[in-house]
Image: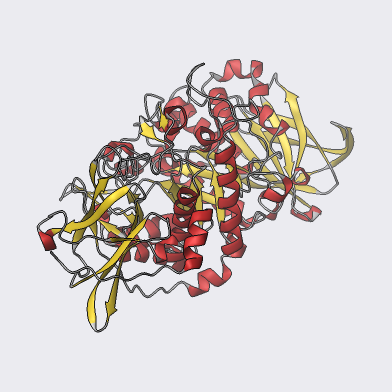
Amino acid sequence: MGIVTSYSLFSEFDIHLFKAGKHYRLFKKMGSHLTTINGISGTYFAVWAPSAKSVSVVGDFNHWAEGEHLLNVRWDQSGIWEGFIPDIKKGDIYKYKIHSNHNDIQTEKADPYARRCEHPPKTASVVWEDEYQWNDNNWLQNRKKHNTNDAPFSVYEVHLGSWKKNIEENRSLSYIELADELVSYVKKMEFTHVELMPVMEYPYDPSWGYQLTGYFAPTSRFGYPDEFKLLVDKFHASDIGVILDWVPSHFPEDAHGLGLFDGTSLYEHPDKRKGYHPDWKSLVFNYGRNEVKSFLISNAIFWLDQYHIDGLRVDAVASMLFLDYSRKEGEWEPNIFGGRENLEAITFMKELNEEIYASFPDVQTIAEESTSFPMVSKPTYLGGLGFGMKWMMGWMHDTLQYFAKEPVYRKHHQNELTFSMTYAFTENFMLPLSHDEVVHGKSSIIGRMPGDEWQQFANLRLLYSYMFTHPGTNLLFMGAEFGQRAEWDFQHSLDWHLLQYDYHSGIQKIIIDLNILYKNNLALYEQQFTISGFEWINYEDHQNSVIAYIRKGTKEKDSLIVVCNFTPVPRTNYRIGLPKKGKLVEVFNSDAKKYNGSGISNTEEIKIMLKNWQYRKYAAEITIPPLATVVFKIKQ
């Protein structure tokens, strides 16, 4: 039998916090940690398995034999097994062999707190630590100005495995290659942030990363943990924030994962009505169990602390909020008040956001929440869930539905386009055109646009221009920024060859210019979450399918006038009401020739007349190009 020395990283206070669900730095205690005791180098292991009768560390170092290295159970009813094993070094692979008191079940599990995992399809954990030297101190000291609610926030969503492939070797790019190519591309495109679809280790490629087994380990598909840190560091060097997709809503049933960890429902809720997700055939965390809350919140803090991440986009929040989510009558149980809300999950999310913002006040949490649940992005002290932002799924659905219609019919559906403004300021909304909108037969974004090729691309330029001038922040999934025609396929690279064609390169150019317009105009971000930052000029011109509005900063001089024409008919001498006298100067036109548009524009300054129009004292007559957005400033 191998040597296991009694040793612990836990204090009594640690155990108290763990049991109370208030230990938010468990990654410093749980898992495997290289250490030296009495001059002997080895590894300390700690794992939570309260229903175990024995826990062995197994690996190549003991020929995977159960009982060779038995951990010691703590006598404080914490359910933690721990011990120091000499001579186990960095790079050694291991699992926990757990013999349960429950029906004598035996499981062999990866370490829930492992810092590195084997490359799938292998499933073992790897003893690991790195001494990466960060170079982003300047970014961290100044990132608050990049992440506040009155800062420009334009996000490029990326699936690392399929953004670009090494064609010769038929493989995805490594973290090191991405640190060069992806970073420079996002910088060129003028996005302020990048959002990475889940990078935590996952066993099944078609899950896109949303079925996690290694919550504390960047996937080994693209390299080592320190190489992922390099990628984050390089983004920060280019003044680009990094947001991670984070999945506390469910986890897979893979034998080496969290399910039935110690022979019992340890991490998942034991009641299938709360503990099993019918949509994804996965297990749901038990949010009412204190130790599980500590695990999840510690995991969120881990990425912010150890990997300098600037924000977490929390996946599938709606599925956590409601007990009847994707369940038929009789398949769910109401809460203690007879309602459908999952009170334990709500409490968990509030505690999560409170801890994140207390420890990292300059980051953002973003909820992917698809219902009308109130106050998702309001502070917990006001009764909200405490997220920084919420995806505006209603805007996405209504806008794409509107754009799919032939322009001749749009006059009958203008309310679909303008409806978002009736609730735009109830939350801090992010406007998403995400990966979910370009899969499963939905077509690509350009594929939804009606008409011939010219009209399709004009519609796409119009859509993006409307999106960037609509109140809120923005998110665009990779490929959409150059009009990829094919649906996204996680197995293949984006169709970069399309950029040789003018229509596609024109879309890329307009995204660059829209990001610049957004970042350089206070009116588009200074009050992006408040009604003070928006004012309708005209939303009633159904017949011409034209809308006009003002985006406002805190100072009147910063205001922008936005006019959109949703038909292929140019509008000349089109009169709009204005708030003050002066001259209109065109500062952006989605129909410009450099975007492969028709080039119809307002080349001269337009004098504003003293004339009552649309309930305003002043008016001007402008030209609106076909299927285009035009943005003006008022010059005194």
Q: Nearer the viewer, residue 174 or 280?
A: 280
Q: On the picture, is 251 further left or further right than 89?
A: right
* Colouring rule applied to residues: secondary structure
Q: Give the image quarter of residue 121.
A: top left
Any part of residue 29 in sight: yes
State the image coordinates of residue 561 (x, y, percent, origin top left): 72, 43
Residue 232: x percent and y percent?
40, 62
Q: Is residue 301 above or below residue 439?
A: below
Q: Nearer the viewer, residue 421 or 98?
A: 98
The quadrant of the image that shows the C terminus is bottom right
The answer to whether any part of residue 626 appears in the image is no
Q: How many marks?
A: 0
View extreme (left): residue: 63
Q: Is residue 448 left or right of residue 543?
A: left
Which residue is at the far front? 75
46 to 436, vertically: above or below: below
Q: Position of residue 181 (x, y in %)?
A: 33, 58
Q: Residue 249, how many percent across, how many down?
A: 45, 40
Placement of the N terminus among the 4 image quadrants: bottom left
Residue drawn at (30%, 49%), measured in percent from left and top? 52
**In the drawing, does residue 420 fall left or right of residue 165?**
right
Position of residue 341 relative to residue 451, above or below, is below
Query: Which quarter of the picture shows residue 576?
Result: top right
Q: Residue at x 32, y 42 (%)?
A: 494
| Residue 197 appears left or right of 618 | left
